[in-house]
Image: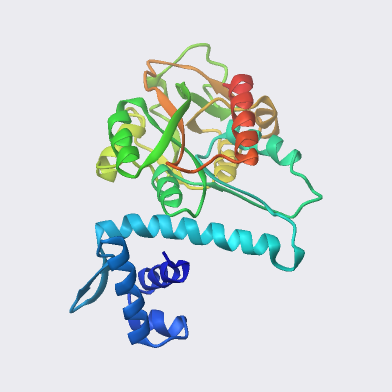
C-alpha cells in the first residue's frame, strides 16, 4: 500500500472535491483519480462515493481514513525526528471536563515535564460530545468525560460504536459550591427545597448521546430552581460564586486551596441522589505513552486526595 495514496485520500476527504484536492496536491485530476482507483482496488473497498452533488465518504471509507490519518501522522513524526538530526519531541494531548481535581492533577503533571526536550502539550476543557469527537478524529489522544451514571447505557453504546476504550476513574455525587457569604453557607443541613430562592450556575453545554438537549438540561438542573446562569468557562464560574452570594453550583469536590482563593465553601445536600462518573477514553489500538501514564497517575492521586 502506498502512503502517498493514503495522503491523497485524506486530502480528498478534507476538501470533499477531487479537483480541489488535486490543486492542493499540485497534481493533475486524472492522475489523482487513477491513484484513488488503484487504492480502492488494492483494498477491495469503495472509499468515496461519486454523486452529482460531489464526493462523499462511504462507511468503509470512514474506517479506512481513521487508520490512514494515524499512519500518516506516525510517518510524519518519524520524519520529523530524523530530519536534520532533530531530537524526539514530547507530545501529549487530553480533553477533560471542567473539574478542579483534574486541573490540579494536570498542574502536578506539568511540573515533571522534561524541559531539556522540546514539547507540545495540549489540555482542553470541554463537554463530553466534543471530547469524544476530538478523540475519534485523532485531534487528541486522551479524553475524560463526565456523565450521570443513569446515562451509562447511552455512552457505552457510543463507545462501542466509535471503537473507544473506556475505564471508569471515579464515581461520586456532586456537592454544593457557594460563597462563604451565601445565606446557606452556615446552615448545618441543606435540603433541595432550600435552593429555590437562589441562582444556579450551570455549564452551558451538557450532552448525552441520543437524547435531546432539552431532556439533558432537565436532568442536569435542580428541579426546585427556576433561575439559572449558564457559563462555559470554569474561572468565570468561580468569580460569579465569589462576587454574587446568591449563586450556587453543583460540582465535584474542590481542593481546599481553591476554596480559600475564592472564599468559597462546599456543602453536602440532603436528597441529592444523582451519581456521576468520570471515564477515561482513548482509541482502540492506541498505545499509551509515558506521558499518558504519568498524567493518569496524577489524576488518580488527585482523586484519592480530593474526592
Pick the front one: 58 or 52? 58
Pick the front one: 136 or 41? 41
Residue in the picture at 37% in, 18% down? 273
Would residue 32 be visible to someone looking at this image? yes
Residue in the picture at 50% in, 25% down? 176
**Furthest residue toward right:** 116
Would residue 208 be visible to someone looking at this image? no
Q: Examine the image and state in which quarter residue 261 appears.
A: top right
Pick the front one: 7 or 246? 7
Q: Examine the image and state in which quarter residue 27 appears.
A: bottom left
Q: Quadrant of the C terminus?
A: top right
Decide if residue 189 is on the left or right side of residue 110.
left
Say if 193 sits above or below 57 in the image: above
Chosen colour scheme: rainbow
Say if 93 sits above or below 144 in the image: below
Q: Position of residue 103 (x, y in %)?
A: 61, 37
Q: Position of residue 269 (x, y in %)?
A: 45, 17
Residue in the picture at 31% in, 30% down? 151
Please count the marks in the image.
Answer: 0
Pick the front one: 107 or 159? 159
Say if 135 sits above or below 178 in the image: below
Decide if residue 90 is on the left or right side of residue 199.
right
Q: Quadrant of the N terminus?
A: bottom left
Q: Position of residue 51 (x, y in %)?
A: 19, 75
Q: Position of residue 155 (x, y in %)?
A: 33, 36
Q: Examine the image and state in which quarter residue 75 appears.
A: bottom right
Amino acid at each position: 500500500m502506498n502512503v502517498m495514496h493514503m495522503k491523497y485520500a485524506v486530502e480528498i476527504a478534507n476538501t470533499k472535491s477531487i479537483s480541489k484536492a488535486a490543486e492542493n496536491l499540485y497534481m493533475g485530476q486524472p492522475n489523482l483519480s487513477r491513484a484513488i482507483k488503484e487504492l480502492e482496488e488494492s483494498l477491495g473497498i469503495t472509499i468515496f462515493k461519486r454523486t452529482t452533488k460531489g464526493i462523499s465518504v462511504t462507511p468503509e471509507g470512514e474506517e479506512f481514513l481513521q487508520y490512514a490519518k494515524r499512519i500518516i501522522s506516525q510517518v510524519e513524526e518519524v520524519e520529523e525526528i530524523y530530519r536534520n538530526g532533530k531530537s524526539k519531541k514530547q507530545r501529549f494531548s487530553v480533553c477533560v471536563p471542567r473539574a478542579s481535581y483534574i486541573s490540579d492533577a494536570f498542574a502536578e503533571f506539568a511540573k515533571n515535564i522534561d524541559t531539556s526536550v522540546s514539547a507540545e502539550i495540549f489540555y482542553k476543557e470541554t463537554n463530553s460530545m466534543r471530547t469524544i469527537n476530538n478523540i475519534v478524529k485523532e485531534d487528541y489522544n486522551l479524553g475524560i468525560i463526565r456523565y450521570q451514571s443513569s446515562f451509562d447505557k447511552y455512552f457505552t453504546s457510543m463507545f462501542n460504536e466509535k471503537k473507544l476504550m473506556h475505564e471508569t476513574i471515579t464515581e461520586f455525587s456532586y456537592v454544593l459550591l457557594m460563597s462563604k457569604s451565601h445565606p446557606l453557607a452556615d446552615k448545618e443541613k441543606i435540603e433541595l427545597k432550600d435552593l429555590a430562592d437562589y441562582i444556579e450556575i450551570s455549564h452551558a453545554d451538557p450532552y448525552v448521546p441520543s437524547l435531546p438537549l432539552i431532556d439533558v438540561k432537565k436532568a442536569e438542573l435542580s428541579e426546585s430552581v427556576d433561575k439559572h446562569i449558564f457559563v462555559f468557562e470554569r474561572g468565570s464560574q468561580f468569580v460569579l460564586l465569589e462576587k454574587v452570594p446568591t449563586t450556587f453550583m453543583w460540582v465535584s469536590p474542590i481542593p481546599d486551596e481553591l476554596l480559600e482563593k475564592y472564599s468559597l465553601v462546599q456543602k453536602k445536600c440532603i436528597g441529592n441522589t444523582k451519581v456521576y462518573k468520570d471515564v477515561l477514553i482513548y482509541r482502540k489500538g492506541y498505545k499509551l505513552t509515558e506521558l499518558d501514564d504519568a498524567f493518569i497517575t496524577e489524576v488518580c492521586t488527585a482523586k484519592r486526595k480530593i474526592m
